[in-house]
Amino acid sequence: MPRPATDPAKAAHIKVLRQQAGRWLKTAREQAGLTQAELARFTTVTSLATQFEIARFTAAVPLQFPNPSATPHNRVDAAAAELLDAVDRSQMERVGLAGRMLGVAAPYDLDQNGTLVGPGLVYKMGRTTGLTEGDVVSVAGRSTVGYPGGTALFVDQIIVAATADNGGPFSAAGDSGSPVLNGDHELVGLLFAGSPNQTLVNPISYVLNELCSALGVSHLTPV
C-alpha cells in the first residue's frame, strides 16, 4: 500500500522544530559543564533531567513590563523550586560562601549625604566565577533588563563592584541566583544581572516578601 503524501510545508516546519530542539538540548548539556563523553550519553531531555534534576519549579515572581500608560517598577527577578527527596541536603551549606549562611542581613543604612554606613564588603559563590568579593557602591540602583517579553525596569537594586584584590569581575553569565553575603555570613541579596564592571543584586528583604506572595505563604526563612 503506498504511503500517503506528506505536506511539504508541514514537513519543513517539523524539521525546523527538531533542529531547534536539538540546539536547545546541546546548549543545556554544555551549560551543565559535561564532558564530551557525558554529552554522548544524554541524548534526550528526559535522560538529562533524570541525571541532573535536583528540584522542581514551584512559583516565580511575576515581572512587570511597560505599557502605554505606565512604566512599572520591578525589584525582584526570582523563582522558587522544591528540592527532590533524593537530594542530599547536607551539601546545601556549600551554596553560600562555601559555608553556612548565618541569618539575613539588615538593610543598608545611608548617612545624610547618601553614603553607605558601615562595611560594604560582600562575597558570593557562583557557578561561573566561583568565590568573589566586591564592594557595595549603591543601594538605589536603577537598570533596564531585556527579556523575551520586553524590557523591564528594576529599581532599588544593590550595585556591587569587584574589589581591587578580586582579580576579575564580581560575576559573569551563569552566576545568576547566587546568594550574596556580607562579612558576617548574613544574606544580603540574590545576584541577578550585571556586566564586567558592576553586578545587580536584588535586596533580600524584597526577595523574601515577593516570594512569599508568589508562594502564598506568610514567612520564609533562608537556611
Image (cartoon, grey):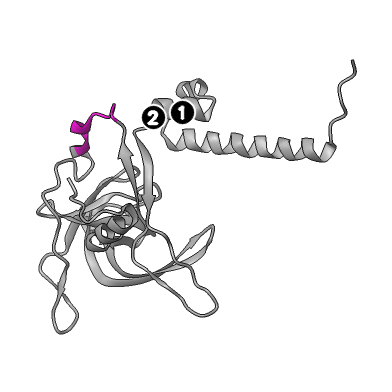
**Quadrant where the N terminus lies?**
top right
Does residue 61 appear to the left or right of 159 in the view shown? right
Identify whether 88 is placed above or below 12. above
Q: How many marks?
A: 2
Identify whether 12 is placed above or below 61. above
**Quadrant where the C terminus lies?**
top left
Label 1, label 2: how many angstroms apart (C-alpha)?
6 Å
At a point 34% along the width and 66% down the height, the residue shown is: 75
Q: Position of residue 40 (x, y in %)?
A: 52, 22
Residues under numbered marks 1 and 2 in contact, where contact means CB atoms less than 8 Å apart: yes
Secondary structure of the residue carrying numbered label 1: helix
**Circle on res. 52:** 2
Dot 1: within a 10 Å radius of its alpha carbon, few (fewer than 14), some, or many (20 or more) residues? Answer: some
Q: Identify the residue at the far right of this view.
A: 2
* Residue 55 lies in the magenta-colored region: no
Instruction: Read off the residue under disc 1.
Output: 48
Q: Position of residue 127 (x, y in %)?
A: 33, 42
Q: Identify the residue at the far bottom of this view.
A: 112
**Nearest the eye: 88 or 81:** 81
Q: Position of residue 186 (x, y in %)?
A: 14, 54
Magenta residues (range): 85-92
